[in-house]
Image: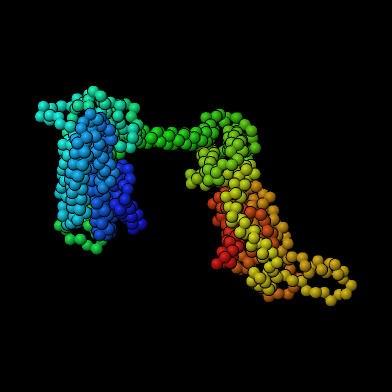
């Protein structure tokens, strides 16, 4: 806020102190910038009132300076039959050039015109303009700004009237009383040329025929000026920059007066209330901001409204089209998936003569469900089997599909298939255990059949985590059981034999062969399996092989009872050791794959305990990397 405030304050000060004023449309542009800045500051509850008031005071100084520049009208004579009405950018730069108006007049009249007009006009202009500038610069900040603007306008108009009267006195004598001031004849005036930076009369008209006519009064020039503006605005294809130029030349006084009136009301409301440290109340500030924004909205609608509205409508149409296309694509995908699954209900399944009986005992029913589902999957005629094939083909086509979308489609397909089986077989348990079991079997077969397309999505999704674990496994590849704080009794180091006749090579193999080699080899087979149920069963097998290695080692030795019992901590430490030595690829992806596709009923016993050990091992190496980076 301070930066923007200082930026506009410096920009306003540069314009006020400049020797040569810039082109006048730049003033309203700066004024509108400052107006927006005042509006943005006024909406904040904790704005400092001193900053806001100083910014508004600077704006008012610019407004008064801009008004003075616009009212600097001068009638410049460069030829005896030519008169130009121009807008100047600095009243101090007014220079009056008086020349002879009539080539046939006497030399005495020429001298009198030159000398008298120079003296009288320069004195009148200097006095009036200096008074105007001095009074504007010495205004008190506590006075009403609206009254000051009106006084400055009146004084500036007086200077222009005095100037025009002096010009009319210095010209040839023509009767003013016989001419009607309210009538404007197009033949009596020179057309305004709006192609230049200033408004000027065309030099091509009225040289010989109108040499005897008098210059019109100030109100006639203003009336002609307004008529020319109205004519130009009625033209259909008017340049946008010219339209803006005309609007600023005509309406800047009204815009500035409106702002000064609003600020005077705002200042009077502020002084009535006690100001706190956080600034004026929000309701007064918001009202002031709304009043200022109204003039801005009117200005924008007048000049750029039509163009900006067309651009906004075009953008809105494009955005709505894009949204509609996205929705259509999503709906098409959903419709295809629903059609694939709903086709199973519409097709005839009377071909299946092996219908299960309701009189079979419950244990046999569970086994019969498994065998029946295996037959369904293996058959090419069953609707579920055909839907499986279509689903696999769609996954193969959309190889680079999103992982979340793939998991969602797999779950929907498996649920619909299980629901189809429930509706077609009456012996399904009402507690939905049979449905869940059927869904798990179908899901396992489906995931196994699309594993080569599905698992690369997991590898790509968790690429960063896999890299972290693989780096840690390389660093710790020489760690021993002692480094993992395994108890010494589970190191399984064979005793050295006293026999001299033993083969030294066999002795070296016996010493350096890892005691848990079977568990390590089983660990390395996990990435080669496609079924999630088989993967989790291999982890259970690793636990059993670790226990077998310990019992085999102490089989022929005399030990105390309970000496070889393995606790949960021992099991986890030994699992970490085998995990390190196996060094399987993409271990984090394997963990997420098991979490997503292992059925819940498989995680209630030892399989759930083994999966928890695997998750702990993966998290151990991730945490180790984080601690090293700290």
Q: Quadrant of the N terminus?
A: bottom left
240 on left or right of 178 = right
Taking 460 as reference, is 196 above or below it? above
Whether residue 256 appears in this view of the structure is no
Q: Residue at x 58, y 59 (%)?
A: 615
Taking 570 as reference, is 229 above or below it? above
The image quarter containing residue 453 is top right
Q: Residue at x 64, y 52 (%)?
A: 535
User: Please, which residue is most extreme toward the front here?
Assistant: 107
502 on left or right of 194 = right
Q: Position of residue 245 (x, y in %)?
A: 31, 37
Q: How is the image coloured?
A: rainbow
529 on left or right of 622 = right
Q: Nearer the viewer, residue 560 or 321?
A: 321
561 on left or right of 274 = right
The image quarter containing residue 464 is bottom right
Q: Position of residue 163 (x, y in %)?
A: 18, 41
């Amino acid at each position: 806020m301070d930066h923007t405030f200082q930026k506009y304050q410096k920009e306003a000060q540069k314009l006020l102190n400049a020797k040569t004023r810039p082109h006048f449309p730049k003033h309203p542009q700066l004024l509108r910038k400052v107006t927006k800045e005042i509006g943005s500051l006024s909406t904040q509850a904790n704005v400092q009132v001193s900053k806001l008031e100083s910014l508004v005071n600077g704006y008012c100084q610019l407004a008064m300076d801009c008004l003075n520049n616009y009212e600097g009208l001068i009638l410049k004579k460069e030829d005896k039959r030519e008169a130009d009405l121009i807008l100047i950018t600095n009243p101090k730069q007014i220079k009056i050039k008086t020349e002879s108006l009539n080539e046939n007049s006497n030399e005495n009249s020429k001298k009198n015109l030159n000398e008298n007009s120079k003296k009288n006009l320069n004195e009148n202009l200097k006095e009036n303009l200096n008074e105007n500038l001095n009074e504007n610069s010495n205004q008190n900040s506590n006075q009403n700004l609206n009254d000051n603007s009106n006084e400055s306008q009146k004084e500036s108009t007086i200077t222009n009237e005095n100037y025009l009267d002096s010009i009319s006195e210095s010209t040839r004598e023509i009767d003013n009383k016989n001419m009607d001031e309210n009538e404007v004849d197009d033949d009596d005036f020179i057309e305004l040329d709006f192609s230049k930076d200033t408004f000027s009369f065309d030099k091509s008209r009225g040289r010989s025929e109108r040499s005897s006519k008098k210059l019109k009064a100030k109100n006639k020039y203003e009336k002609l000026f307004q008529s020319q503006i109205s004519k130009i605005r009625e033209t259909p294809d008017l340049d946008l920059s010219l339209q803006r130029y005309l609007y600023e030349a005509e309406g800047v006084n009204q815009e500035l007066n409106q702002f000064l009136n609003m600020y005077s009301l705002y200042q009077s409301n502020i002084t009535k209330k006690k100001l706190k440290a956080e600034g004026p109340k929000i309701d007064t500030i918001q009202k002031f901001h709304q009043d200022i924004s109204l003039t801005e909205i009117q200005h924008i609608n007048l000049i750029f409204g039509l163009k900006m509205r067309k651009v906004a409508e075009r953008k809105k149409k494009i955005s709505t089209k894009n949204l509609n296309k996205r929705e259509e694509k999503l709906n098409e995908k959903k419709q295809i998936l629903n059609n694939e699954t709903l086709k199973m209900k519409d097709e005839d399944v009377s071909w299946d003569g092996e219908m299960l009986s309701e009189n079979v005992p419950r244990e046999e029913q569970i086994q019969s469900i498994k065998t029946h589902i295996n037959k369904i999957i293996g058959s090419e005629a069953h609707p579920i089997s055909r839907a499986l094939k279509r689903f696999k083909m769609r996954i193969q086509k959309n190889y680079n599909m999103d992982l979340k979308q793939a998991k969602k489609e797999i779950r929907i397909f498996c649920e619909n298939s299980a629901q189809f089986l429930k509706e077609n077989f009456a012996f399904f348990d009402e507690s939905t255990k049979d449905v869940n079991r059927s869904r798990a079997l179908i899901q396992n077969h489906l995931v196994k059949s699309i594993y080569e397309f599905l698992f690369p999505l997991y590898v790509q999704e968790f690429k960063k985590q896999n890299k972290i674990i693989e780096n840690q496994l390389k660093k710790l590849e020489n760690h021993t059981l002692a480094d993992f704080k395994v108890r010494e009794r589970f190191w399984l180091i064979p005793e050295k034999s006293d026999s001299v006749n033993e083969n030294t090579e066999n002795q070296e193999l016996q010493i350096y062969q890892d005691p848990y080699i079977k568990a390590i080899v089983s660990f390395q087979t996990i990435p080669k399996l496609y079924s999630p149920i088989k993967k989790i069963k291999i982890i259970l097998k690793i636990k059993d092989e670790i226990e077998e290695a310990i019992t085999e080692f102490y089989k022929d030795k005399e030990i105390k009872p309970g000496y070889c019992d393995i606790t949960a901590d021992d099991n986890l430490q030994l699992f970490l050791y085998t995990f390190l030595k196996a060094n399987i690829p993409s271990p984090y992806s394997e963990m997420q794959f098991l979490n997503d596709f292992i059925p819940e009923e498989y995680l209630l016993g030892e399989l759930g305990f083994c999966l928890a050990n695997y998750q702990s091992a993966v998290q151990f190496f991730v945490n180790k990397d984080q601690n090293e980076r700290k």
